[in-house]
Image (spheres, grey):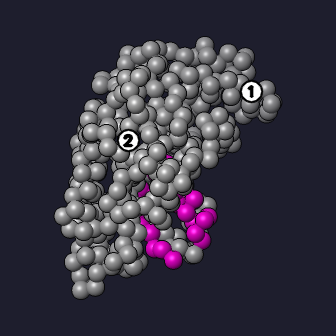
């Protein structure tokens, strides 16, 4: 039985990991630590909040004393670190939060883990610190470049990716210098349930339902490898179970898509749902283009963002070979599930978008 501390466990990927882990390993103890900033949502954990093996703690990963207390009080042996500022646009306009959370926060976690697991009278030999990173640390690819491998040199191009690269290096250093049992995974773009509505896929879905513009940066030909979020959780599971300590593992979806094609695919799926389910027209009266089967008319090209990487692609051969990893969802099946989830969970995304959730958080945790 493992005892996990999951940082950022109320966020998009973290919450999906918690759901995955508690469903598969029901006897394990899971403690979630989350600061509940704009992207952290306690409602993401509603289905597990009453489980006797689940504990939620509202706090910041920069609080080293709190981390040490949690590690000791809950006898934590596995720390899975998702907590991060992750939106590139926000990092361009306000990089300070990214430096604080992604670098200083990771450093605080490493210091706490070393102190509790390695520096005390009783060393916890079976501990694991797993760090969740991104393919963006590798920089950008041309259309003909081979995909990123674990040996690709780091070349981050945004304050976000630079802060993640720095945290990756700190994790590596704590293994090689102090012997901390670490693993790192670098993932491609995730999508699925609980994805914060400012990100591309949920933004397109919700904008169609509001009949507002679908903004496309530049020419829309930026290419990303898309990974269904539950497949990401599965990949991390394999790394925790069988990954070699000190190693990095790429977790990808083997699904390269241009942004404009993503938008057009979602548009068609939403239109199909409106045909199949006549109730949607009543539930979403503003969705005029969806009812008229003309959602692509909402596409609007806007000025490209600063330093926009042209292409990301993950080569997950190492993870496939060593851990028998293979995504279970194709993009076609995963995006259909995602569109259906947003159509069936309007209350969740509406509370995030209209600010009522953040007002509630302020009342509960001020």
Residue 226: horizontal and vertical position, in percent?
51, 36
Q: Mark 2 points at which residue?
A: 149
Please report the bounds of the magenta region as a residue range: 1-26
Q: In the rendered image, which quarter is residue 87 located in?
A: top left
**Residues at marks 1 and 2, CA–CA distance in whole angstroms:** 38 Å
Residue 31: horizontal and vertical position, in percent?
45, 68
Q: In this view, does 185 lie above or below 22?
A: above
Task: Assign a secondary structure to mark 1.
Answer: helix
Q: Is residue 266 above or below residue 98?
A: above
**Counting other residues with Cα less than 10 Å from the Cα at mark 1, is it few (<14), some (14-19), or many (20 or more)?**
some
Residue 15: say if magenta: yes
Task: Assign a secondary structure to mark 2.
Answer: loop
Label 1 with label 2: CB-CB less than 8 Å: no
Q: Name the residue under label 1.
A: 272
Q: Is residue 159 above or below residue 128?
A: above
Judge by depth and name the residue closer to the eye, 358 or 146: 146
**Counting other residues with Cα less than 10 Å from the Cα at mark 2, is it few (<14), some (14-19), or many (20 or more)?**
some
Q: Do we see residue 359 in this rendering?
A: no
Q: In this view, does 258 lie to the left or right of 286?
A: left
The residue furthest left is 177
Q: Do we see residue 12 in this rendering?
A: yes
Q: In this view, does 361 lie to the left or right of 154?
A: right
Q: Residue 345 carries which label?
A: none
The residue furthest front is 321
Q: In this view, does 9 lie to the left or right of 71?
A: right
Q: Which of marks 1 and 2 is nearer the N terminus?
A: 2
The residue furthest bottom is 121
């Amino acid at each position: 039985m493992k005892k996990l501390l999951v940082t950022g466990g109320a966020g998009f990927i973290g919450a999906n990991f918690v759901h995955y882990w508690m469903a598969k390993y029901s006897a394990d103890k899971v403690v979630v630590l989350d600061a509940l900033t704009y992207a952290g949502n306690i409602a993401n954990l509603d289905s597990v909040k009453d489980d006797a093996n689940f504990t939620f703690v509202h706090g910041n990963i920069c609080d080293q004393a709190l981390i040490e207390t949690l590690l000791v009080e809950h006898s934590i042996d596995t720390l899975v670190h998702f907590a991060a500022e992750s939106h590139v646009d926000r990092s361009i306009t306000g990089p300070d939060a990214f430096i604080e959370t992604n670098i200083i926060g990771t450093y605080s976690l490493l210091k706490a883990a070393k102190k509790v697991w390695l520096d005390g009278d009783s060393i916890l030999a079976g501990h694991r610190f797993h760090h969740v990173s991104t393919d963006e640390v590798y920089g950008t690819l041309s259309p003909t470049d081979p995909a990123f491998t674990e040996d690709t040199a780091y070349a981050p191009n945004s304050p976000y990716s630079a802060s993640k690269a720095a945290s990756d290096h700190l994790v590596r250093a704590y293994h090689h210098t102090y012997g901390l049992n670490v693993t790192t995974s670098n993932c491609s773009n995730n999508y699925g349930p609980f994805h914060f509505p400012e990100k591309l896929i949920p933004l397109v879905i919700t904008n169609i339902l509001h009949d507002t513009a679908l903004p496309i940066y530049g020419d829309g030909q930026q290419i990303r490898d898309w990974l269904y979020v539950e497949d990401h959780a599965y990949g991390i599971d394999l790394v925790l179970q069988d990954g070699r300590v000190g190693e990095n593992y790429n977790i990808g979806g083997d699904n390269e898509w241009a942004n404009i094609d993503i938008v057009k695919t979602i548009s068609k799926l939403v239109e199909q749902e409106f045909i199949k389910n006549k109730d949607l027209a009543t539930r979403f009266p503003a969705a005029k283009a969806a009812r008229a089967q003309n959602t692509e008319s909402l596409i609007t090209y806007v000025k490209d963002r600063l330093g926009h990487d042209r292409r990301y692609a993950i080569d997950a051969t190492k993870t496939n070979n060593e851990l028998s990893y293979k995504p279970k969802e194709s993009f076609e099946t995963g995006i259909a599930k995602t569109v259906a989830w947003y159509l069936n969970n309007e209350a969740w995304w509406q509370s995030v978008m209209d600010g009522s959730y953040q007002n509630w958080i302020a009342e509960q945790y001020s």
